[in-house]
Image: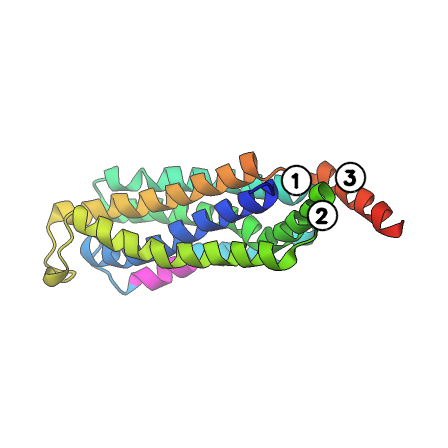
Amino acid sequence: MKNRPAVGATVAAMGMFLGMQSATTANTIMFATYFNQASMSGVVQMIGFLPMVIFIPFIKKLVNKFGKKEASVAGTILSLVGGAIMLVFPTIESRDTGLIVYLVGLVLFGIGLGVYTCVSWAMMGDAIDYNEWKFGTREEGTVYSLHSFFRKLAQGVGPSAVIFIMGVLGYVEELGTIGQSPETAKNMCWLVAGLYMFSAVLQFIGIAFVYNLDKKTVETMNKELEEKRAK
């Protein structure tokens, strides 16, 4: 708990999985009940993930120029914009127009998420260095294990929590995807948009406010650790 970078990166990762994994569950139901196109849900999810691939060839240059935290914060701000756009689509009467707005928000969310996805484990590496720098102990196993545990916890708890929320919002499993009321179908839209927004907010909080290793601090930390090890 004293290792702020590890806590911040873990909060961001939990936000990513709580939002993304949970939204995947609700997204399938939304397309089946609201858009009446259940087969499109997988294609749309793929569209949301594809922008992440864009950053793979450029991530090293981005990190070298701006820093891992700085680049990730910029990405989470873009994800927040995407989440805000997705919150608009349930208010649009035309479902075709609403789908286009939803896709625009999803693509922006995916682009923003792409930066953090590429550097998330590298940020944890810096968190381990931070532990050695501040407290004199290097605990790779403990830090990585706890980080992985909470990531998996979010992956497991998220979809289960969403199924419960869906029930609260009127979804009746026995009716299938074609027997739900129009109000329930609309509620699924709000749920999906809300989950993406929740994911972006939690990522932003974890990286921008808790994770405290900006580019300058990392350079200072690495320099002092090298000097310490040399001695």
Q: Which mark is residue 39?
A: none
Local SS, label 1: loop
The part of the chain drawn in magenta is: 40-46
* CA–CA distance in space, label 2 to label 3: 13 Å
Q: How far separated are the C-alphas under marks 3 and 1?
A: 10 Å
Q: List the residue tagged with mark 1.
A: 213
Residue drawn at (23%, 48%) of the image = 165
93 with respect to 138 (left or right):
left
Q: Is residue 160 above or below residue 2?
A: below
At label 2, which amino acid type do we have? Answer: Glu
Q: Residue furthest bottom?
A: 39
Do the CB atoms of the residues marked 2 and 3 lie less than 8 Å apart?
no
* Amino acid type, callout 3: Thr
The amino acid on which the numbered mark 1 sits, given as a three-letter code, is Leu
| Of the two numbered discs 2 and 1 in the rendering, the one whose residue sits closer to the viewer | 2
Ranked by sequence position, the earlier of labels 2 and 3 is 2
Magenta segment main secondary structure: helix
Q: Which residue position holds label 2?
A: 132
Tell me residue 68's x, y (percent).
64, 45
Q: Percent x, y for residue 117?
A: 54, 53
